[in-house]
Image (cartoon, grey):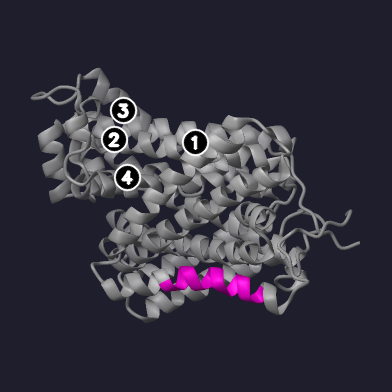
Amino acid sequence: MTETRLQGTLGPGAIVFMVVAAAAPLTVVAGSVPIGMALGNGAGYPAMYAVAAVILMLFAVGFVAMARHVPDAGAFYSYVEKGLGRGPGLGAAFLALITYTAVQGAVYGYLGFALDELLVTYGVPSLPWWLWTLAAIAVTGLLGYRHIDLSGRVLGVLLVAEIAIVLLLDLAVVGRGGSDTEGLSTGVLHLDTITSGAPGIGLMFAIAGFIGFEATAVFRDEARDPDRTIPRATYAALVVIGVFYSVSAWAVVSGWGESAAVAQANANPGTMVAVTTEQYLGSAAGHVVQVLLVSSLFACVLSFHNVLSRYLFALGGAAVLPAALGRSHSRHHSPHLSSLVQTGCAAALLAVCAGAGLDPVAEVFAWLSGAATAGILLLMLLTSVAVLVWFHRSRADTRFWHTRLAPGLGLAGLAVCLFITVRNLPLLVGGSQTLALVIDGVLVLSVVGGIALARVRPGVSTARLRTTP
């Protein structure tokens, strides 16, 4: 019999590996931290990760409380449909596909560039970035075709390695007492430092570092005990990501001294963390950071590939997309057809970018990551509204903190973050107001398109159709 359900024995730790890998911790520390300091609030930027974690933790309270009432593995759009109806649910589904495709495409572009740069240092002839990207897409597709436990083990190894090198840097900076001139930074303890510069832009970059944490719910079918595993994994992922980013960003600032760190972030953001590592751990460690940056990017695209494949799988099972996408492999119990389609879409997107002659970092990575940040915030905003509406109507849970106060505070925080992101989106896409408007339009039209589809095809729903394997 054709299988239409996924299977697995993932515990909280394995799922946390998946979502933390999607956050690409080394990539964030090496890439986003210097940029967040330069364009945001300087030495106060590490505090923005703590602020972002608090906002997302408030959001997660309602998200987790509703999880036991949403048995589908569709994550955000399943929540939106249950709370706001079929049309908004389909709109959220299409928005999710665009958002995660954008963030995966952004990282694929950066990965091709970083891999070429790394190999050139070891004597390999330089090749076009898109050749390395296509090779990475092929390997990712192969792993995504197989059982989820294989991807989990690969992500676990890569994640431990990249976190280990950053933690060693953190310990080295603390062990030496920070920079020789200023010592350990205290800027994160002073409100005037935190609010200096442009804290709103700093918060925008900090929020972007958490993209993917909500994907815990996507692995519901493959979790060992979904009602307990998913909540634990969600909270654990937020705590791990929030603490890791905050401490590591503070260590980078402390390694240079507050004034010197801001100057370095403005002058050489791309090499700041690698240079810091060489200063505190030696030149060999600097080379290790370069290697692990590539593995961090690969772990990120593999994680998002798994998430996207499961979105396609759920939509296939719901007859929103072709039903074949909702079938799982008889031996691997994986969404194999959805994985193949997702691999093809990724290759097509990057082929278009390469054919247009776009720079893999300044354009592919920057533009697509900007679109993804706005998209994920809009998705979470819709989900927050759905959570509040559903608990108000159903009375399935009457705990005030879990169903009213925390989700309401999370909604307010996300609304502020979305406003800041949309207002500053031109900054993320090379200063082009026109491109920013196009991205905004695509995101909004994806939601409108879902609502229109629900009207044209009244029988279509994002609620998963389940059959026993």
Q: Amino acid at mark 1?
A: Met
Residue 381 position within the rendered picture, expressed as x and y whole percent measured from the top left: 50, 52
Q: Amino acid at mark 2?
A: Pro
Q: Work out which residue is located at the far right of the displayed protein and give it.
A: 1
Residue 152 position within the rendered picture, expressed as x and y whole percent measured from the top left: 61, 43
Q: Amino acid at mark 3?
A: Asp
Hey, which quadrant is residue 251 in on the image? top left
Residue tagged by mark 4? 203
- Image-based side of 10 in relation to 47, left or right: right
Residue tagged by mark 3? 170
Residues packed near mark 3 inside 10 Å, few (<14), some (14 to 19) or many (20 plus): many
Distance CA(mark 4)–CA(mark 2): 10 Å
Residue tagged by mark 2? 46
Q: Which residues are magenta?
A: 441-453
- Taking the spot 61% from the left edge, 71% from the top edge, the residue there is 450
Near-viewer residue (174 or 75): 75
Residue 74 position within the rendered picture, expressed as x and y whole percent measured from the top left: 67, 54
Residue tagged by mark 1? 57
For marks 1 and 4, the one nearer the N-term is 1
Distance CA(mark 1)–CA(mark 4): 15 Å
- Taking the spot 69% from the left edge, 39% from the top edge, the residue there is 10
Q: Quadrant location of the C terminus?
A: bottom right
Residues packed near mark 1 inside 10 Å, few (<14), some (14 to 19) or many (20 plus): many
Whether residue 146 is visible, yes or no, is yes
- Nearer mark to the viewer, of 4 and 2: 4
